[in-house]
Image: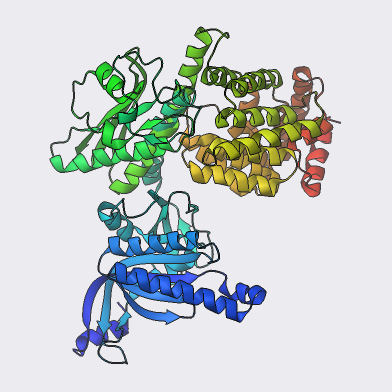
Amino acid sequence: MTVSALQAMSDGTGTSRILTLVFTDLADSTALKTTHGDELVGDLIEQHRELVRRFAEEFEGRIIDWAGDGCFLTFETASAAVSFALRIQQAHADARELPGVRTGLHMGEVGERPGPDGDGAPPRVAGLAVDLAARIAGLARPGQVLMSAAVGNSARQRIDPGLLRQPIRWQAYGSYLLKGFDEPLSIREAGLEGIARFVAPTASEKAAPVAEPQTSLRRRRLLPLALGSLVVALIAYLVGTAALEPPAVTNANDVRQTTPDLAEVPGFGGRPAIAVLPFDNRSPDPEQAFFADGLAEDLIMRLSSWRAFPVIARNSSFQHRGGNLDLKRVSAELGARYLVEGSVRRAGDQIRVTAQLIDASTDQHVWAQSYDRAITDLFTLQDEISSTIAASLVGDLTRAEGERARQRGTENLEAWSLYQLGMQHAERFSLEEYGEARKFFARAVDRDPRFATARAQLALSTVMEIMLGGSGVREDMVSTAFESGRRAVALDARDPTAHAALGGAYLAAGDPKNGIDSIQRAVDLNPSMPEAWTWLGWAQVLAGNPEAAIAASLRAQQLNPQGSMVWIYENLAVAYWEVGRYEEGLELARRLVATQPSYPTGYAYIAMNAIGLGEIDEARAAIIAGRQARPDLSLALIQGYFGVSRPAFDARRNEVLRQAGLE
C-alpha cells in the first residue's frame, strides 16, 4: 500500500477497502485531432464519456477521476467491473466512428479518503493496486479488456452470460513482470466473440513475459493438449461430415426424429451433428461439479467455432445427465450422430479428465484420451483442456468421415461426402494430390453452391498447386483462388476456413500484409483451429517476421500434437534458418523430408541449415536427393514457392543454395 493510503488510515480520515479498479483510455485521440480537427475529436470524446457515465451508473461504479480521454473508476465487485468494460467494448464496436478503448482492471486493497471537493465529490483512492490497474491498461491494445487473474477468476464465476448480445470469451496470457514491481502478475483477457481480437500483450521495457518453471510449464501445455485435442479430434472427424451450411449451436428441438437411423438428420442438410453431454463429476466433493460442467460448456463453445458442422445447444444436450445412458436413444433424441462424453475426478491437488468421442450410429469409439494434471488455476486449466480436446477431435473426425465417404464410392455422393474425399487427397501433400482434391471440392461446390467451406478448400488447394509449381498459368490460378476465397467469405463471414483461404490467395499473389489480416481473422474466429495458426505462421515467414512465425507454428503443433506436421515442419525449418537456429532448423527439415519426400522445399531447407552449420557435404547431398524426387528442383521453383519478393532474404537464400549446388 502507498504511503498516502497508510497515512489516510492512520490519521483517521480514510478507510481501507478491497475494490475492483478500472482504467480506460480512448485510443488514438491525439492522432485523430491531427486528421479530423479538435472540434470533431472533442465531440467523440464527449460521446465516449457519456457512455462511460451511463454504464458506470448501470453497474454501480464510481468515476473517481477523468484525465483527458481517460477515466479511473472503482466497482464493488469484479463481475460488475468486467460487465462495465464489456459494455463499453460493445458500444464502441457498434458506433464505428468511435476509436477503440484500452481497458485495464485489477482488484486489491486500497486506501480511500474524502476528496478535496468535500461531501458528494469523488474520494481519493490510492494504493499499489491502483498503480497495477493503470499498468495493465497500458498493456491493452485498442478495443482490448485486460485484467489480473484475481479479477478474471472472480468475474467469470458470477458474470451474467446473457447480459450482452455476443458470447463472452476468456483468455489467459501467462505472467508478466511489470516495471516497478517485484512480483509477476498473471494477465487475462475478457472479450466479446466477434469483436475482441485476443492478442497477448507485447513484451516491452514496461512489461516482460515471465517464463514458467519447467514443471509448471509442462503441466500447462499438456492441458491445452487436452480439451483442444478433444475439440480438434472431434472436429477433424466432424469437419468432414458437416461443412454444408453456416454452422451454429443448434437447438435439438428443431431436429428430432422418430428413428435412431442418423444417416440423414432432418434440419442439417444430411450433415451429422455433434452433442457434448455433461461431464460426470467422479470426485468425492460434489462442489467439483462446477468444473465438470464448465469443461463441457467450454467444449461446446469451442466446437461451435468450427463452421463445418452443427453443434447441439447446451440446454438440449445437458438434459442427458448421468451414467449408463442409452447412447443410441440420446443421439436420436438430440439428432446428433456424434456424442462427446467424459468425466472429471479430483484428489487433492491432482485432477484427471477423461473424454471420448462416440459414433452413435455404430456405437463405436472414434477417439478417447485421459489427462492427469496438477491443479493451479482451475479456470486456466478449464480453458486449456477444452482447447486441446477441441483440436484433437478435428483430425479424427475428418479421417473417419472421409473413410465413410470413400466406402460409399464416388457416385451420387452428397456435397459433404465429396468434400471429405477432397480432404483425403489434400492431406497427402503432393502436387498431384492437391490437383485431385481441387476436383472433388469443385464437384462439392457444383452440388451445393452455398457450401462455403468447400469453396474455401477449393481456393486453398489451388494455392498449394501454385506453390508446388503446378502447370497452369500462375496469374490465372491466383485469380481462381481469389474468386473462390472471396465467395467463401461472402457466403459465410464467420467461417474461419474461408478467411484462411482468402489469406492464402493473398500470399500467392505476393501480398503478405493482407494475407496476415485475413488469416488473423480466421484465428480470431476459431483460436482452436491449428490449420489457421499454421497458415498464419507461413504468412509471417513471407512477411519477414520469423519469431512470429515460430510462435504461431508452435501454437498449431500444441493444438494438434498428433496431426500432420508437414506445414509446421516447413514453417519452423525456414524460420529457424532465418534467425540462425540452424541445428533446430536442420532437424525439422530432415523430418519434413522423411514425412513428405515429394516436397521440394524440404531438401532446400536441409541444405540451407546444413550450410549454416558448415556441413557442406550434407547440403550438397540434400540437393542431389531433391533433384531425384523433383527433377525440376531449381532456384526458380523455390522462389515460386515463396511467391513473395524479399530482396535481402531471397539473395541470402539463393547464395546458400548455390553453395549446395542448386541453380
Q: Quadrant of the C terminus?
A: top right
Q: Nearer the viewer, residue 75 or 615?
A: 75
Q: Residue at x 83, y 40 (%)?
A: 655
Q: Nearer the viewer, residue 630 or 379?
A: 379
The answer to whether 21 is drawn above or below residue 655 in the figure is: below
Q: Quadrant of the N terminus?
A: bottom left
Residue 381 location (% of width, % of height): 33, 44
State the residue lying farthest toward the bottom.
117
Residue 272 location (% of width, % of height): 41, 22
Residue 508 location (% of width, % of height): 73, 37
Left or right of 54, for residue 11: left
Q: Residue at x 62, y 77 (%)?
A: 33
State the residue lying farthest toward the right.
663
Q: Residue at x 76, y 28 (%)?
A: 617
Left or right of 120, for residue 30: right
Is residue 270 among what the camera can see? yes
Left or right of 91, for residue 537: right
